[in-house]
Image (cartoon, helix red, strand yellow):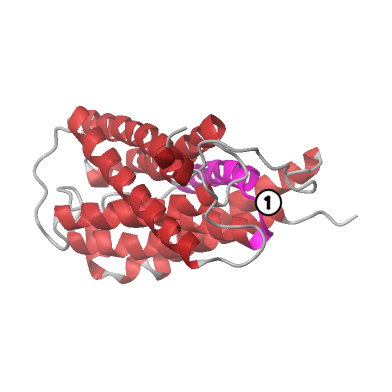
């Protein structure tokens, strides 16, 4: 094993004892490496898969600045569960690919498809966005696992009481989280996003709510609950750490992409959705982590 790889594979967050200066410097270097890995993942994926879309107006944050900001905050959000993971190597990489693609791309683009009457996104562009998101996750996950020192190691045993539910227990938790997601979705949509007059004008007359909307969001609530499970399974430490990890991944990865200028959504509408998505998914992610780590009383 090379000296560089040996250095990267040193644990930076000890389970016991103090956190020393050298460990702090190494952790900062590794987090910077994760940021570079995310930046490379964005650049390489967008270079290999061309998205045929009109040029985005340079409103709000310039695209180059948005790329740096989004790469930084998404890398840091994913770095936390990676560093605190009890898994290593390919198993951890696979989990990060599933979580990153599922949260950042799949869950957002199925909603884009549902509301496409308002957004008017061409289908070839939508498919290219999905493919780019999947490729970005495939690039970032192994690079991040490498630079964060989780390529090799001995997996720790899972907390005995974690994810040990009866069949009714699983059903109740999934049902609760799916209904909670619908409540959070509509509450934050109204009390946060729709407080921007630009957002109200943008969506006026483009979509008439009916019974399909809450049913669709219930389905998304089930999928959100399922996407939290890999994070619950891979995390070590106390329950609050898992809650924090899920909140960061859900909140940041969903909200960050709307910082990019695009030709389909004006800057103020994107701003409304950024604050709506960040606040709602931080809250929902934390509650989801609490539900999945809460021990059943006997």
Along the horizontal axis of the image, is 187 left or right of 237? left
Taking the spot 60% from the left edge, 67% from the top edge, the residue there is 18
Tell me: 72 left or right of 65. Answer: right
Residue 44 placement: quadrant: top left
Q: Is residue 182 placed above or below 126 in the rendered structure? A: below
Q: Which SS class for mark 1?
A: helix
Figure check: 149 above or below 134: below
Residue depicted at 72% across the width and 44% down the height: 158
**Residue 43 magenta:** no
Residue 29: x and y, percent?
37, 55
- Quick one: label 1, few (<14), some, or many (20+) residues within 10 Å? many
Magenta span: 212-240
**Numbered circles on residues, count:** 1
- The spot of residue 145 in percent (x, y) is 46, 40
Magenta residues, dominant SS class:
helix
Q: Which of 101 and 185 is in front in this view?
A: 101
Would you name the residue on which mark 1 appears?
292
Most foreground residue, 229 or 284: 229
Residue 133, percent from left and from top? 33, 36
Position of the C terminus by quadrant:
bottom right
Q: Can residue 102 be seen in this view?
A: no
Query: Can I make out residue 20 in this image?
Result: yes
Instruction: List x then y, in percent, for residue 272.
Output: 30, 64
From the viewer's perspective, tell me whether residue 240 is left or right of residue 198.
Answer: right
Name the residue at the front extreme: 3
């Amino acid at each position: 094993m090379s000296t560089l790889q040996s250095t990267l594979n040193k644990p930076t967050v000890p389970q016991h004892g103090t956190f020393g200066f050298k460990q702090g410097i190494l952790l900062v270097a590794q987090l910077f490496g994760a940021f570079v890995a995310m930046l490379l993942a964005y650049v390489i994926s967008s270079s290999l898969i061309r998205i045929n879309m009109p040029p985005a107006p340079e409103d709000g944050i310039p695209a180059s600045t948005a790329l740096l900001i989004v790469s930084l905050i998404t890398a840091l959000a994913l770095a936390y569960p990676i560093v605190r993971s009890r898994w290593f190597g390919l198993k951890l990489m696979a989990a990060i690919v599933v979580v990153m693609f599922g949260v950042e791309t799949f869950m957002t683009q199925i909603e884009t498809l549902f509301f496409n009457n308002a957004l008017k996104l061409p289908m070839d562009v939508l498919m290219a966005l999905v493919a780019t998101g999947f490729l970005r996750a495939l690039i970032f996950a192994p690079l991040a696992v490498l630079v964060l020192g989780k390529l090799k190691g001995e997996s720790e045993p899972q907390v005995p009481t974690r994810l040990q539910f009866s069949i009714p227990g699983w059903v109740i938790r999934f049902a609760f989280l799916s209904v909670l997601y619908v409540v959070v979705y509509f509450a934050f949509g109204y009390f946060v996003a729709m407080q921007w007059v630009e957002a109200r004008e943008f969506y006026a007359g483009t979509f008439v709510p009916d019974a399909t909307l809450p049913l669709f969001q219930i389905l998304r609530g089930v999928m959100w609950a399922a996407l939290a499970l890999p994070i619950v399974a891979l995390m070590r430490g106390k329950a609050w750490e898992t809650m924090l990890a899920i909140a960061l991944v859900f909140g940041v990865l969903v909200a960050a992409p709307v910082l990019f200028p695009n030709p389909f959504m004006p800057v103020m509408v994107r701003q409304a959705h950024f604050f709506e998505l960040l606040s709602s998914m931080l809250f929902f992610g934390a509650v989801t982590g609490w539900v999945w780590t809460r021990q059943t009383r006997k």
